[in-house]
Image: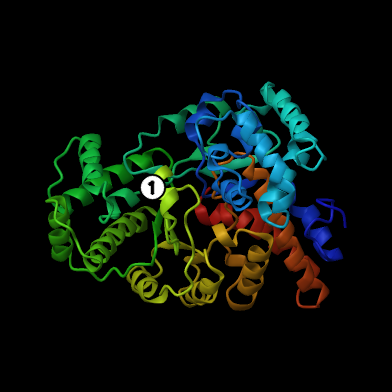
Amino acid sequence: MAFLDNNYLITNAAGKILFEKIKDLPVIDPHNHANVKEIADNGHYADAWQLFAATDHYVWEMLRKREVPEELITGKNNSNHDKFLAMAKVFPEIAGNPVYEWIHLDLKRYFGIDDLLCEANGEKIWQEVNAKLATDAFRPQALLTGPLNVEVMSSTDDLIDTLEDHARVNEAVGRTLIRPTWRPDKAMKIFASTWREYIGQVEKRFDMKISSFADLVDAMKKSHDFFAAHGCLASDHGMEIPLGVDVDYAEANRIFQKALGGEKVSAEEADRYMGAFMAEAAELNAQTGWVTQLHAGAVRDVRNVLWDNLGPDVGGDISDHNQDFSTGLISFLNRFDSRLKTVLYCLDQGHQATLATISRAFGSTVRLGSAWWLCDTPIGMKRQLEYIGQVDLWYDFAGMVSDSRKLLSYGSRFEMFRRVLADVLGEAVEKGRLPMEIAETLAETMAYKEPKRFWGL
C-alpha cells in the first residue's frame, strides 16, 4: 500500500467495495466553524498559508512541537510565504499525525500535487497552489459546490449574530448551502471576565434591559426565534463537564444578579447558574425540534504563555479522562427524556464507554457524534466506530462533522472518515459478523442518509 493510494486506510476487500459505494456521496456537515463572511464575500484566497494553516490550530500545535518560532506561526511580522516555507521545512517530521495526511490529501485531491511537502519543494508547491488559487475555480463558493460536494453545512454562530452572510451565500448559490447553529455559550459562561460586558451586548442587540435571569431567558427566546426564522436547526454548547439541570429558578436568578452586580461567584454557583441556563436553552430546542449538541471535556487554555500572548483557541487546550460525565448528563437527559434530540461528542477516549452506554440507555433521541478533536484521527474514529457497533447502534450514529475552520476539511476529513467507516464495516463482513448487503446499507446510512434525516437537513 503506497502513501494515500486507493487503499489508504482500508485493509480488507469488503471495505474497498464499501468505500466505492460511499466515497462520492454529498457531504452533510452538521457542525463546523466556517467563516461565513469569507464564503459570502467569495474572494480569492490570498495564498497557500491562508488556505492550509492560517486558521488551523492543529497545524500550529505540530509546528510548535517541531520548534518553529511562534512568529512564523501566528506572528504579524513575517509574511505568509515565510510561514509556509517554515512549515514545509519541518513537515516530514510530523508524519504519523493526521495533519500530515490531511494537508497531503488536500494537495493531491484538489491541486493535483503528488509531491511530499518538504524544504526542498516548499517553494515549488507554494507557487503551484497560489497559481490555482488565483483562478475562479478555487473561490470558496466554487469549491464548496464543486469538488468538495457539500450539500449542506451548519456553521457555529453567537446568540447575538445577525446572520446576513448566511443569506448572502444561499442567495448566491441558489439553495440553502449554509445554515446557522445557535451557540449561546457567552451568555452561559458566567465565570468569564467578559460576561458582564457580553450581557450588555445582548441588551443592545435586542433593545431591552436585562436585570434578571428571566430577562435573559426572554432575550434567549428572541434570539432563538430569530435563528429559527433563518433556517437554524440545532444549538451547540461547550462545557468542561456536563451540567445537572435540577436548579431552582430563584437560585439561578440570585446568582445571575450577584454576577451582574460585579460580585465574584463561586465555582459551585457558576455551575448551578449554567445548569439552569442549559435547561432553559434545551427547553427552547425541545419545543422547536432542534438538535442539542453537547461538546464536553475540553480543559481550556492550560498553557499560560499562549493565553497571555495570543488568547483563546490557539492550541492550548487538553483533555482530562478523570472528569465526571455521567452525573450531569443523567440529570439533563432525564429532564428531557424522549423529547429532545441530543448529540454527545467525545474528546477523550476514556469517556467513550460512558457516552456510549448513556446513549444506549436513553434511546434513539440521544446519539453519539463523530470522534471529536483529539479523537478525530484514524485510530480515534476506528476505535469509536468499533465500540459503537458493540455497545450502541451503528444505525443511530449522528454522522461525521468537520468541526473545522478550514474549507478544504470538507474534503480531507470526510474522506478520512469514510475510509475508516468502510474499513470497520468491511472487517465485520470478513469476520462473518455482518452480511455484505447490510453493510452496504449501513455505510450509506451512516455516511449520509441518517445524519441528513436526524438533523433535518
Pointer 1 residue: 308
Residue under the image location 57 percent in, 46 percent down: 60
Q: Which of 18 and 201 is in front in this view?
A: 201
Left/right of residue 239 with respect to residue 398 in the rendered view: left
Residue under the image location 64 percent in, 29 percent down: 81
The answer to whether residue 338 is seen in the rendering is yes
x then y, percent, for residue 169: 51, 29
x then y, percent, for residue 381: 64, 63
x then y, percent, for residue 455: 51, 53
x then y, percent, for residue 199: 22, 44
Residue under the image location 72 percent in, 30 percent down: 126
Residue under the image location 37 percent in, 52 percent down: 288
Q: Which of 74 and 452 is in front in this view?
A: 74
Q: Residues within 10 Å of mark 1 (few under 14, many from 20)?
A: few
Q: Nearer the viewer, residue 122 or 201?
A: 122
Left/right of residue 160 with respect to residue 213 in the rendered view: right
**Picture quadrant of residue 430:** bottom right
Quadrant in the picture for the N terminus: bottom right
Q: In this view, does 394 lie above or below 223?
A: below
Q: In this view, does 306 lie above or below 35?
A: below
**Picture quadrant of residue 254:** bottom left
Q: In this view, does 277 lie above or below 384?
A: above
Left/right of residue 436 with respect to residue 290 in the rendered view: right
Three-letter amino acid code at the position of disc 1: Asp
